């Protein structure tokens, strides 16, 4: 698997379309809860945005008060990121090589959708090891990825009905999906990756999943949700190097709130907190 897999984001037309994208529809759910997740898990302000694309996720971090550096392998995407945010710091990096960045220097590494396009288990493990090297001992990696369900349902911002073969895809297979919020209607080719397979990757990379969130849309939100209120399009993993550093002992997993949960959640700790539309709170 992975032979001949190309990064669709190298493409100039794709970069152009992506550069106009903010947080519409289904994407809103990927970002909605990040401020609260960061507030809870991240101490400090230095951040690296792995797979920054045209800078949407880096600008998001900067707006929350992080000193964020964006890195990406796709020249066209980084060019757009710099044009849009001349004050920001964006770097083109060789695939798998972040040696130009200091070890143990970051409080937060964000990876928003980057692993959706990374083909094999070996490559995912190697990259997560590289990201692990960058964070401080108390630092966190927050990885937002597509859930396998996104490739077999219809969404406010995506369609997959032209690709019934996605239903037969197994972990590591290619799947196709069309973004509805951009002018470029060519399908994006992703690699489907299950929760179980991600957990194996984290284990091999010596990372501990501290929290796993699956955001759901709510009826109060100003979007015409399609599947979003019932099926989570994204999975958000909070990863650390030391499970015991910021949580009480006796790990256990909990479900979401009993009434209208905006997401389901598995925690590595028994703490409870209110859910909802959280505002950015920085420490
Ligand atoms: C779907 S885009 C997401 C961009 C951005 N994070 C956002 O939320 O708008 C994924 C990005 O990951 C980048 N990417 C893929 N593999 C990468 C790698 N090995 N190292 C750095 N960036 C990578 C792609 O070039 C692409 O720009």
Image (cartoon, grey):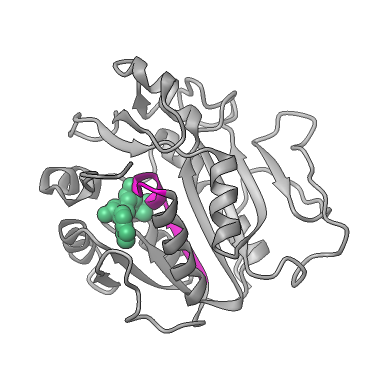
**Between residues 223 and 132, which one lies in front from this camera angle?**
132
Residue 261 rendering spot, x and y as whole percentages: 70, 33
Q: In this orientation, does residue 66 appear?
A: yes
**Residue at left offset 21%, top offset 66%:** 82
**Residue at left offset 54%, top offset 43%:** 197
Residue 92 lies, with reference to residue 280, above or below; the image says below
Residue 41 within the magenta-colored segment of the rendering = no
**Residue at left offset 59%, top offset 41%:** 196
**Between residues 241 and 44, which one lies in front from this camera angle?**
241
Q: In this orientation, does residue 35 appear?
A: no
The stretch of residues the image draws in magenta is 108-120
Q: Quadrant of residue 254?
A: top right
Residue 112 rendering spot, x and y as whole percentages: 42, 52
Q: Quadrant of the N terminus?
A: top left
Q: Quadrant of the C terminus?
A: bottom right
Residue 114 within the magenta-colored segment of the rendering = yes
User: Along the horizontal axis of the image, is 129 left or right of 281?
Assistant: left
Residue 128 rendering spot, x and y as whole percentages: 47, 62
Q: Quadrant of residue 232?
A: top right
User: Along the horizontal axis of the image, is 50 left or right of 184?
Assistant: right
Q: Quadrant of residue 251?
A: bottom right
């Amino acid at each position: 698997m992975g032979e001949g897999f190309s990064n669709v984001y190298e493409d100039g037309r794709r970069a152009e379309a992506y550069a106009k994208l903010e947080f519409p529809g289904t994407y809103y759910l990927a970002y909605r809860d990040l401020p609260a997740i960061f507030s809870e898990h991240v101490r400090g302000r230095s951040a690296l945005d792995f797979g920054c694309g045209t800078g949407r996720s880096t600008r998001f971090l900067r707006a929350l008060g992080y000193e964020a550096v964006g890195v990406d392998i796709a020249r066209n995407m980084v060019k757009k990121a710099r044009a849009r945010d001349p004050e920001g710091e964006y770097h083109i990096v060789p695939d798998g090589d972040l040696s130009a960045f200091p070890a143990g220097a970051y409080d937060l590494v964000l990876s928003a959708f980057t692993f959706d396009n990374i083909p094999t288990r070996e490559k995912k493990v190697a990259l997560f090891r590289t990201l692990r090297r960058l964070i401080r001992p108390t630092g966190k990696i927050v990885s937002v990825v597509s859930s396998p369900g996104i490739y077999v349902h219809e969404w406010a911002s995506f369609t997959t009905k032209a690709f019934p073969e996605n239903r037969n895809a197994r972990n590591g297979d290619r799947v196709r999906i069309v973004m509805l919020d951009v002018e470029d209607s060519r399908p994006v080719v992703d690699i489907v990756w299950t929760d179980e397979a991600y957990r194996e990757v984290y284990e091999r990379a010596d990372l501990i999943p501290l929290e796993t969130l699956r955001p759901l849309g709510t009826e109060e939100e100003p979007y015409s949700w399609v599947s979003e209120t019932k099926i989570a399009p994204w999975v958000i993993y909070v990863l650390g190097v030391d499970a015991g550093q910021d949580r009480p002992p006796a790990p256990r997993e909990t479900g979401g709130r009993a009434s209208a949960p905006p997401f389901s959640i598995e925690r590595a700790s028994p703490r409870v907190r209110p859910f909802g539309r959280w505002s950015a709170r920085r420490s």
